[in-house]
Every structure is written in structure tokens, then in C-alpha cells.
Image (spheres, rainbow, N blue to C red):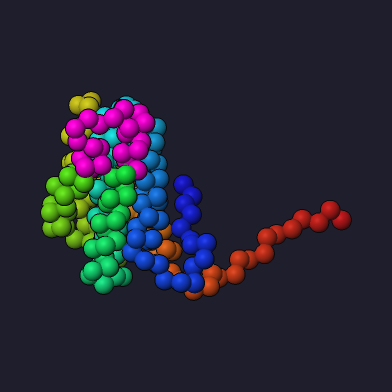
Amino acid sequence: MRIKSRWFRDDKPKSAQQLAGAVAFIVWRVVQNALKRMRVAQFDIDPGPQYFSFSGEFLVFLVQIADRIAYQRMEASERIAFTTALALRLGEILEDNQTDLLGPAGDRSYRSRFISLFNERSPDYAHYGYTDAGPDFAFVRHLGNSLLEIMPEKDHSWVVSQVMEIEAPEAVAMVQKSMADLFQTGPRPARAPRARVSGD
């Protein structure tokens, strides 16, 4: 999956909110890609509540990853602003999609449900390790176990290994690369000229 992760004008530092908006778009696409791959691998994830439960758990996981990357690159107050804006923006995107497919949420908005899930999971993820190499085993295992609760029983034997060995590492790598690109400022490196074929 190709993701655009360069600013149109990247010579000026970006605010925490600007970074969060760009990362939210990327994270949403990464989760949709993971869902598509899981369905291609014959896991039953039907459009509807289950689809969005899966999305919500994976989004929370990737917000935690983005927060750890921000921790390495931002001052504390800026990191808090970034992570808060990221979670809120993803809640909005999730709500827009759920409303389109499922209709109005009723008394409690889809966005507020996502934020509650984020707040519920965050203390657990806070115990796990993250380095330049990525999240530790327990970090990724927590995502696998959270998704296990969503999947039908027939998929229980394989879903954790699929998530831990394939989907999570690929998703983390895409977020890491995209955020590294987004944090860069300064002139872009010149592109190599495209090869041309002569008709002579």
C-alpha cells in the first residue's frame, strides 16, 4: 500500500494539530488495509458492528504507536496535544463511517465510544515497551487478545498469530515510516530523472 507522507510545502515546522491530522489520515488507511488483508486471509469480519469494533481496537493500538514515536521527537506538552488531537480526529473519522453504514448512534455518539475505548486501553498499553525496533511482544500481544474477543470462534485458533506476525508488524512499519517522513523539514531531496526511451 502506498501512502503519501510528505508535506506539499515541507520547509516549515508543523504544529502538533497539523501532524495529528496527517497521521490520522494515514492511520485510518493502514487499518483499512489490515482489515482488507484479514478478509482476504479468510477471517470473517462482516461489514457492520464487528467491522467497526475491529477498526476501533486497531486504531487504538496505532495511536499508542504514534504516541511513542511522538515521545521520541516532541516536548511533553506538544506530545500530549498531538496524541489528543490524533485520537479525537480518528474518533471523528470512525463516527462518519459508522453513521454512513449503521445510521445514527443514539444516545452516545460513536466518537465518544471510541474515546472511551482509547481511555480504557491506554493504561494497559502504557506498561509495554517500545524502542526504535518497534513495540515489544506484550504490546502486540495485547492487540491480538483484544481482537480475539471480536472474532467468531472458528477464527480463534489463528487470529492472534495472524495479527502478531503479519498485520501488526506491517501496520507499525507503515506508521513509523510515515511519521519519520512527516517530521522531516527542509528541502526535499531532488528526484532522480526518469528514464527515457528513444524511438531512434
Say whether residue 30 is visible.
no
Residue 109, x across and y down, in percent: 23, 37
Q: How many marks?
A: 0
Q: Residue furthest right?
A: 200
- Which is the main secondary structure of the residues drawn in magenta? helix
Say whether residue 119 is visible.
yes
Q: Residue at x 26, y 62 (%)?
A: 81
Residue 41, above or below 171? above
Out of 116 and 197, give the one closest to the viewer.
Answer: 116
Residue 20, x across and y down, in percent: 34, 58
The image quarter in which residue 128 lies: bottom left
The image quarter in which residue 41 lies: top left
Out of 56 and 168, give the one closest to the viewer.
Answer: 56
The image quarter in which residue 83 lies: bottom left
Out of 186 and 32, give the one closest to the viewer.
Answer: 186
Residue 158, above or below 92? above
Q: Residue at x 25, y 49 (%)?
A: 61
Residue 97, x across and y down, in percent: 35, 36
Q: Residue at x 25, y 37 (%)?
A: 110
Residue 196, above or below 38? below
- Which stretch did the figure color magenta? 93-114
Q: Residue at x 77, y 55 (%)?
A: 197
Residue 93, x across and y down, in percent: 35, 43
Q: Is residue 11 left or right of residue 19?
A: right
Where does the C terminus fall, quadrant-wise? bottom right
Out of 62 and 12, give the one closest to the viewer.
Answer: 12
Is residue 49 inside the magenta stretch? Answer: no
